[in-house]
Image (tube, grey):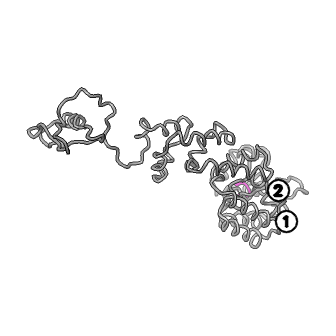
Amino acid sequence: MVPRSVFSRTILNNITWLNGKKYLSSIPCCANAVSDTYIKTDSSEINVIKSTNEDLSDVNPHLPKTFNLAAYVNKSRILQNLLFLNVNLSKIEKKPHIAEKLMKLDFDDIKDHILFLKDYVDADNIGIFFTINPMILYQSLDDLKVRIHYLQSKCFTHDQIQQIISKNPFWLMFSTIRIDRRLGFYQNKFNLVGDEIRLLATKRPKIITYNLHHINTNTFVIKEEMGFEDHEMKQLILQKPKLWMLNQKVLLERFHYIHNIMNIPHETILKSPGVILCRNFKLKQRHLFLEKLGRAQYNPNKENYVPIIALAEGTDLEFCNKYAKTNISDFNIFLKTL
């Protein structure tokens, strides 16, 4: 039998170049079969085991389609530069079709994209930006400039544009026509004026490019099933636009507990809409604890008032000290009874 180490060295020594391509010759299975091996080409026969003085440092075994980009970094200039920008290649390689397209890019073709985007994305976040949306490197630079100019024409300030692009890396993937239609949709749907639509787009830019069917469904839920009026919905979307991005079932469950179980009226919810963004288990834990202590009092006109936002914000320690007026160990013991 041929020792495994000898067999491995034999494989590595049998890599050669033929007509500008790499080939791995056939390796016999036993020591007695190892002999000079010849490969026929159009011109002559080449001995692939014969020693050579040529520099073979660049000769590598063929890399199969594993889409593990780490295997290509030493040979790929674009991957090296993306790493310098703190791009997380491990996330990109999870999408093989994107990883394959990225490998075919020439860094000289995209460096202008990077220089252009650095005016709108902080240097510390540029790597995160490209990790989330590497396909922006395939967008025409002229198209990107037109989309920025569109926002400028709609009176968005430079700071607002920076926030929009940084918070929503996919914004620039939308044409000016699509963005204009989206902004018009929200302006008409919620009766927003110019400053208000700019506030919405800056505060939550992802909602502008979000699925419109989902937005329409949540609008129906908030108006028809939760009972908010049109002017109240306008107030809600300007304060907490993320409500329109929640799952409809989750949204209704949270509202049901706050409004029907805790008996919090619409007017109070409107003053602190962030409470709906809190998970139900956290609301339930804190509300029941206050109820046990006799401090579940959410009416500002009465004594021992506790703002409902206290159920959603702050640490448990802060909640116990400031609102429950008790020790956190008591709260932890109470949680074990639930």
Q: Is residue 233 left or right of residue 279?
A: right
Q: Residue at x 65, y 67 (%)?
A: 249
Q: From which residue to which does the magenta span run? A: 283-287
- Residue at (85, 65) in percent of width and height: 231
Kindly identify which residue carries mark 2. Answer: 196
Q: How many marks?
A: 2
In terms of secondary structure, what is the magenta stretch mainly? helix
| Residue 215 in picture, x, y percent from top left | 69, 65
The circle drawn on residue 100 is none
- Report the front residue among 135 and 105: 105
Residue at the far left in the pictured view: 32
Above or below 269: residue 166? above
Q: Is residue 166 magenta?
A: no
Q: Is residue 284 found inside the magenta-colored segment of the image? A: yes
Image coordinates of residue 139 in percent, x first then y, are: 59, 51
Residue occupying the far front of the picture: 43
Q: Secondary structure at mark 1?
A: helix
Residue at image location 12% in from the left, 37% down from the top: 36
- Is 208 above or below relative to 33? below
Quadrant in which residue 284 is drawn: bottom right
In the image, is residue 201 above or below residue 122? below
Numbered disc 2: secondary structure: helix
- Few, some or many C-alpha atoms within 10 Å of disc 1 (few <14, some 14-19, many ≥20)? few
Residue type at tag 2 = Glu
Q: Which residue is mark 1?
A: 231
Instruction: Look at the image and tell me in which quarter the C terminus lies.
Output: bottom right
Q: Crowding near pointer 2: few (<14 within 10 Å), some, many (20+)? A: some
